[in-house]
């Protein structure tokens, strides 16, 4: 039941379904019957957060326990935020409409660095002090916990969180909740709970660590206190085939970004693209059996009514039983007119059979990511895709009736030259020429090749964590050069303003001194900064200047191999030695085989007790 005070505001805002709750599949419990309440916060708008699979998984995992109640919380858009303030309504959860300050845990999934100021906005709207040090040692406020890919280097937001959950949360989060209940039962204070939490595998309590700096601004040492472990290692699910997975999702009343059923078919990646953080921090590679994927997809479609199911992973076509998966799914998906989406396809293992299975119900364009235009640069980044393989894949697609191809590239990659930028257009033009050279191409239709270029951001736990980022001027030169080379009307080029990527890079590899910068940007209006209309780069440069921090120190400076990096005390399974070796190979344009072909000893195998490619169900 929507409280009257909130109900009367809904008709005054755009898209009121974002704030009204009550969707099919949402979990409602009697709060008097539960022992622990968890507010799962996504620091972005509803239609973005409701598309996130991690939220769906952990919402189900926690709510499957009868004594826990997990509820959803999203950032309000500007219009509804003003209405909330005018009526003195604190940020609330969508299931109970209770303020988040009344929960035991307030947990944020942190997917993108540009959401950091939104986290602070949500805390303030929830009447929770921004800094963990200001929340006291009693139990006056919820425990603020963060998880997701950005916590592989949480230092720029360390002062705002009590705990970070490193790695995968399906097993770890319930353990933390049980420890919380035990500590509350024993009557110990919050500080004692945090000390005990630091002893659990995969949990980082930033207040139990101090950082010293050298005169040049680099990290001198990272020191643990109160017997906290010197290194915190991420958690993983060892048997991915048996991990808890939802049988149903919350189905929204309004459009969201990815409004479909989703089954995660594998975790990790065998490829080792040197720019890709996800490919390293989600190692080791683990997959679900074909029967498991089929059963989970069928349950979700039956319980939600969706007519599209997406088989999600970093590289779905690397699933060893993908054809078996598709064969098992085909009878019931064709009967129910349910389409199957494979969003992560590789050009080096695409086939006619795969295209036929994907296009059976609904014909769509296809998307591939060569990442670089020239073979030399693709070798440097270890993409391991050749031009011939891309052309063969496009030929299969065109022969199957596809007329729209999207190609994703990055600019600003290490070792890149203007010749590599020109090669992006050359590759796109070859795809167009291929279409018109085929006698069996789709008749009566033209082809459109969409080229999307993002700006490279060096990320922690990748071989490029040591590399400088291009300056704004260098990015602009390359963007202008690319557009000037495109002459064909069949090739459409898209790219984003580089300044957002530069701020992202500051936060991705930053240290604790940036906590002051993040808070300053927030106080000066920073919020929802992943949206172009809300982003202002000057706020960031002004804040850096105020605290005597040079943003170029974080972006355009090369790190030495022996430098202590701000995330040195965090272990995501991949060794620094391996990253150094891969970085050296990049500068020689030398590739490394994928994990199925050869193990290069990245270190992630230690998390499973055996070499990744030898891992069996």
Image: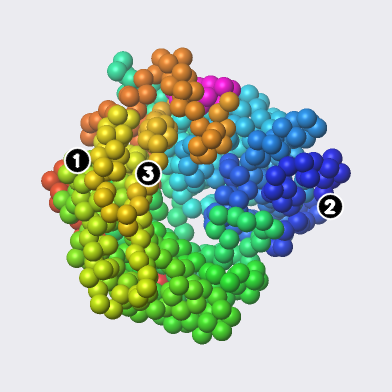
**In the visual, does 334 lie left or right of 121?**
left
At 81% from the left and 54% from the top, the residue drawn is 30
Instruction: Describe the colour scheme in one phrase.
Output: rainbow
| Residue on which disc 1 sits | 418
* For residue 582, above or below residue 116: below
| Residue on which disc 2 sits | 1
> Which of disc 3 and disc 2 is earlier in sequence?
2
Which mark is nearer the camera, 2 or 3?
Answer: 3
Q: Which mark is residue 495?
A: 3
Q: Distance between the Cα atoms at labels 2 and 3?
A: 45 Å
Task: Assess disc 2: are there few (<14), some (14-19) or many (≥20) residues with their C-alpha within 10 Å of its C-alpha.
Answer: few
* For residue 407, above or below residue 223: below
* For residue 223, above or below residue 77: above
**In the visual, does 261 lie left or right of 559?**
right
The kind of secondary structure element at disc 1 is helix
Q: Which residues are magenta?
A: 513-524
Residue 128 position by quadrant: top right
Is residue 334 at all visible to an observer of this figure?
A: yes
Magenta-colored segment: predominant secondary structure: helix
The kind of secondary structure element at disc 3 is strand
- The image position of residue 440, as x and y in percent, is 28, 78
* For residue 476, above or below residue 95: above
At 38% from the left and 64% from the top, the residue drawn is 404
- The image position of residue 580, as x and y in percent, is 22, 42
At 56% from the left and 84% from the top, the residue drawn is 335
Task: Assess disc 3: are there few (<14), some (14-19) or many (≥20) residues with their C-alpha within 10 Å of its C-alpha.
Answer: some
């Amino acid at each position: 039941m929507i409280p009257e005070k909130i109900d009367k505001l809904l008709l005054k805002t755009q898209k009121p379904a974002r704030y009204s709750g009550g969707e099919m599949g949402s979990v409602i419990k009697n709060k008097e019957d539960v022992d622990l309440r968890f507010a799962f916060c996504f620091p972005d708008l509803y239609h973005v957060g409701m598309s996130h699979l991690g939220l769906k998984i952990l919402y189900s995992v926690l709510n499957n326990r009868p004594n826990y109640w997990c509820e959803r919380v999203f950032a309000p858009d500007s219009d509804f935020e003003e209405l909330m303030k005018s009526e003195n309504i604190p940020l609330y959860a969508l299931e109970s409409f209770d303020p988040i300050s009344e929960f035991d845990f307030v947990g944020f999934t942190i997917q993108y660095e540009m959401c950091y100021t939104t986290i602070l906005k949500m805390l303030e709207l929830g009447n929770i002090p921004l800094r963990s040090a200001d929340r006291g040692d009693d139990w006056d406020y919820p425990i603020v916990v963060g998880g997701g890919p950005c916590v592989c280097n949480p230092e720029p937001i360390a002062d705002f969180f009590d705990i970070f959950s490193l790695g995968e949360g399906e097993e770890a989060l319930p353990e933390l909740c049980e420890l919380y209940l035990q500590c509350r039962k024993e009557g110990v204070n919050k500080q004692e709970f945090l000390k005990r939490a630091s002893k659990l595998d995969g949990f980082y309590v930033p207040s139990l660590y101090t950082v010293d700096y050298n005169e040049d601004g680099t990290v001198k040492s990272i020191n643990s206190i109160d017997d906290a472990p010197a290194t915190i290692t991420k958690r993983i699910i060892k048997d991915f085939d048996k991990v808890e997975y939802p049988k149903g999702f919350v189905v929204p009343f309004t459009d969201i970004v990815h409004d479909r059923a989703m089954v995660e078919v594998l975790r990790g990646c065998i490829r080792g693209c040197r720019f890709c953080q996800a490919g390293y921090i989600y190692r080791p590679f683990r997959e679900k059996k074909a029967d498991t994927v089929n059963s989970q997809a069928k349950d979700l479609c039956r319980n939600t009514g969706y007519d599209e199911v997406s088989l999600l992973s970093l590289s779905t076509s690397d699933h060893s039983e993908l054809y078996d998966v598709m064969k098992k799914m085909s009878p019931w998906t064709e009967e129910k007119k349910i389409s199957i989406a494979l969003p992560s396809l590789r050009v080096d293992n695409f086939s006619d059979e795969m295209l036929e299975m994907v296009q059976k119900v609904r014909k769509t364009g296809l998307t591939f990511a060569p990442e670089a235009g020239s073979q030399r640069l693709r070798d440097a980044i270890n993409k391991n895709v050749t031009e011939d393989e891309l052309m063969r894949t496009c030929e299969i697609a065109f022969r199957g009736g596809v007329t729209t191809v999207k190609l994703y590239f990055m600019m600003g990659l290490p070792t890149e030259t203007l010749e590599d930028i020109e090669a992006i257009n050359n590759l796109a033009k070859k795809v167009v020429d291929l279409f018109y050279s085929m006698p069996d191409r789709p008749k009566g239709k033209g082809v459109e090749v969409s080229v999307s270029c993002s700006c490279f951001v060096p990320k922690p736990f990748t071989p490029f964590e040591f590399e400088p980022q291009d300056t704004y001027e260098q990015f602009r030169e390359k963007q202008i050069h690319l557009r000037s080379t495109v002459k064909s009307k069949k090739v459409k080029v898209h790219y984003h303003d580089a300044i957002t990527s530069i701020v992202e890079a500051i936060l991705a590899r930053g240290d604790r001194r940036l906590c002051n910068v993040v808070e300053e940007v927030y106080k000066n209006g920073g919020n929802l900064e992943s949206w172009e209309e809300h982003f202002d780069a000057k706020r960031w440069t002004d804040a850096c200047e105020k605290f005597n921090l040079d943003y170029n120190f974080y972006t355009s400076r090369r790190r030495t191999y022996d430098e202590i990096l701000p995330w040195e005390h965090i272990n995501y399974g991949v060794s620094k030695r391996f990253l150094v070796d891969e970085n050296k190979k990049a500068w020689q344009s030398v590739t490394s085989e994928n994990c199925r072909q050869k193990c290069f000893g990245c270190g992630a195998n230690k998390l499973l007790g055996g070499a990744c490619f030898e891992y069996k169900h």
